[in-house]
């Protein structure tokens, strides 16, 4: 390249020692700095982009924190170097851990099914009743040699009748077990959909192209109806495009993941129709990525705008957004992850994230300056919305939409923390979090 | 005079075997196939031992037993519970509801005759 590490560091405005850490995968970078380094080296930004390495780093750190790894002396401070030197092995470890997790979940659900499945419970009961009648009658025939012919014939008839009924029960059980044989999976449906979006850089060119035309039609609709109209247009015009995308993505293995992907792509199409790429980027920047102001400007829903922000093309001075959606039970139901942010996949997440707290004050936009134990800081912006029916006495069903950005990227937005913003101490998950004085801890941290 | 056993069981082929076994052991047998009828029968003429299946139409065996234990006239009636579900929870529920003994299907003929004979000899509980 003809440029030394320290010259490069100086020219992009960082210290040579920090550059050294970046080079050894000990610091993760993104956004503007990545862009400056790529520019200075005159190479494509994608060649430097460490997104997939960062995801792998997060996965391996989490695996190291699992109870099974606790006493193995895993060299956690060298995870980045391990990935850099042995990427194949690192991927194999992460993939094995994921398969192990899947196998555990499957074993657990099979065990739950065996103990709670009403059909199995009823069938076992019927089977034991039949066996009981046969055994008792057979024992009588064997043990009593003074019974009358009439009694003997009666007990033979019982054995005959009950053994036929037993075989019917057995056949029904075999048919049921055959039917419930499901294909093996390596990912959860949420993960599968995330992998589809990740593989496409959160952006689908086919949908963007078609959305430009559909947007012109949308302009003719009254402002108050645009939301519903955009949805109708997306359903009407994007079905084939969406099916094509799903069919060509091999990682969508299960029916459930394909259905989930269909809904996710339809949401994407609604966003693209309402906020076409050509207009959205400039508009969002002018409004300093204020989600509510963008909603107002395009007559769009909060979550549609959040999703649209994740599809912004990576450029210098454009913040990178991650998107997370959780249900009332804290379950993650949609994620377009930010690669620099560890979101636990194998253990419960930290309850202090605003993602979970937002449901305490629904329909209110809440910002959180999340300070992680590693020192990294993210800005989270969350809002809970009702997805169920409305009416007096009708239970609300809230889900929370949250976008995440690094603190540095947040400075380009209205959500930039200022001197009065109090950082909140949060963690990735209890196993990965060293804060031993946290009252919300439910699991011990990994010991050093 | 022979001791009397009321058999509450809705499977006719099992009733047939139990009736044969218990009559051979010297008991007089009467049979009911539903929970409410069993309760009525016990109240009208209490047997010496009640053999009660758990899975019954209308009112299950646990509920029949709870009602019997709640009534001062039938509180001490010796009860043997019979079920096809051998799980631990069932056994615990049976004893909590006040069963004196518990046998799971498929049962051994000897075990059931021995259990009924023990309860008949012991007579009403002293609690």
Image: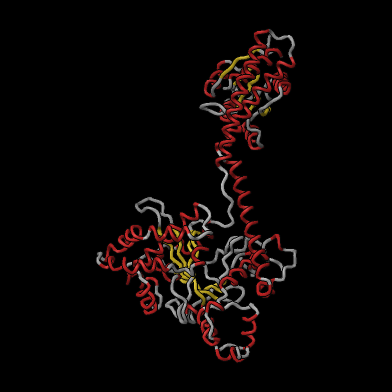
Q: Which residue occupies the foreground of this view, A410 or B45?
A: A410
Q: Residue at 46% x, 54% y: name it.
A: A259
Residue A116 location in percent, x, y? 58, 41
Residue A295 location in percent, x, y? 35, 69
Q: Residue at 58% x, 40% y: name it.
A: A178
Q: Residue at 47% x, 76% y: name it.
A: A314
Q: Is residue B1 above or below residue A21?
A: above
Q: Is residue B48 above or below residue A251?
A: above
Q: Residue at 42% x, 77% y: name it.
A: A414
Q: Quadrant of the C terminus of chain A?
A: bottom right
The answer to whether residue B118 is left or right of residue A315 is right
Q: Which residue occupies the foreground of this view, A303 or A330?
A: A303
Q: Quadrant of residue A299?
A: bottom left
Q: Quadrant of residue B11?
A: top right
The answer to whether residue A448 is left or right of residue A182 is right
The colour scheme used here is secondary structure
Q: Is residue A436 visible?
A: no
Q: Which residue occupies the foreground of this view, A72 or A218?
A: A218
Residue A308 location in percent, x, y? 41, 69
Q: Which residue occupies the foreground of this view, A390 or A439?
A: A390
Q: Quadrant of residue A53?
A: bottom right
């Amino acid at each position: 390249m003809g440029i030394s590490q320290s010259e490069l560091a100086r020219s992009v405005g960082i210290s040579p020692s920090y550059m050294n850490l970046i080079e050894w995968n000990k610091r993760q970078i993104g956004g503007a700095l990545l862009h400056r380094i790529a520019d200075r080296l005159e190479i494509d930004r994608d060649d430097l982009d460490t997104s997939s390495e960062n995801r792998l780093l997060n996965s391996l750190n989490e695996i190291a924190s699992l109870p099974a790894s606790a006493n193995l002396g895993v060299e956690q401070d060298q995870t980045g170097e391990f990935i850099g030197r042995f990427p194949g092995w690192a991927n194999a470890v992460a993939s094995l851990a994921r398969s192990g997790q899947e196998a555990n979940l499957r074993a657990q659900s099979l065990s739950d099914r065996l103990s709670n499945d009403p059909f199995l419970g009823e069938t076992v009961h019927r089977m034991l009743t039949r066996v009981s009648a046969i055994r008792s009658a057979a024992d009588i025939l064997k043990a009593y040699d003074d019974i009358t012919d009439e009694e003997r014939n009666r007990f033979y008839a019982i054995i005959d009748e009950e053994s036929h009924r037993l075989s019917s029960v057995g056949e029904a059980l075999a048919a049921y077990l055959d039917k419930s044989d499901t294909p093996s999976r390596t990912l959860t449906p949420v993960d599968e959909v995330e992998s589809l979006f990740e593989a496409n850089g959160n952006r689908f060119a086919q949908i963007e192209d078609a959305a430009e035309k559909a947007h012109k039609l949308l302009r003719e609709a009254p402002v108050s109806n645009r939301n519903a109209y955009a949805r109708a247009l997306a359903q009407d015009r994007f079905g084939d495009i969406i099916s094509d995308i799903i069919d060509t993505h091999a990682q969508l293995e299960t029916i459930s993941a394909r259905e989930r992907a269909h809904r996710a792509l339809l949401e994407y199409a609604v966003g693209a129709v309402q906020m076409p790429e050509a207009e959205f980027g400039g508009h969002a920047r002018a409004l300093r990525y204020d989600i509510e102001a963008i909603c107002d400007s395009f007559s769009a829903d909060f979550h549609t705008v959040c999703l649209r922000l994740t599809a912004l093309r990576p450029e210098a001075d454009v913040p990178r957004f991650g998107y997370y959606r959780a249900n009332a039970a804290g379950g993650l139901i949609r994620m377009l992850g930010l690669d620099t942010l560890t979101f636990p996949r194998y253990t419960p997440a930290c309850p202090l994230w605003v993602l979970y707290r937002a449901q305490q004050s629904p329909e209110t936009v809440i910002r959180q300056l999340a300070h992680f134990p590693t020192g990294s800081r993210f800005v989270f912006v969350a809002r809970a919305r009702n997805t169920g029916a409305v009416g007096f006495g009708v239970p609300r069903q809230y889900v929370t939409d949250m976008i995440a950005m690094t603190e540095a990227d947040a400075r380009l937005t209205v959500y930039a923390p200022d001197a009065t913003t109090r950082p909140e101490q949060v963690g990735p998950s209890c196993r990965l979090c060293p804060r031993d004085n946290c009252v919300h801890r439910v699991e011990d941290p990994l010991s050093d | 005079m022979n001791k009397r056993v009321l058999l509450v069981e809705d499977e006719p082929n099992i009733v047939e075997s139990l009736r044969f076994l218990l009559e051979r052991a010297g008991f007089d047998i009467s049979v009911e196939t539903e929970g409410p009828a069993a309760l009525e029968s016990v109240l009208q003429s209490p047997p010496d031992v009640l053999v009660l299946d758990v899975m019954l139409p209308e009112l299950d065996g646990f509920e029949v037993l709870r009602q019997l234990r709640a009534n001062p006239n039938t509180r001490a009636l010796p009860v043997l519970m019979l079920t096809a579900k051998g799980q631990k929870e069932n056994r615990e529920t049976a004893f909590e509801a006040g069963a004196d003994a518990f046998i799971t299907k498929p049962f051994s003929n000897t075990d059931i005759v021995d259990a009924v004979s023990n309860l008949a000899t012991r007579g009403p509980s002293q609690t």
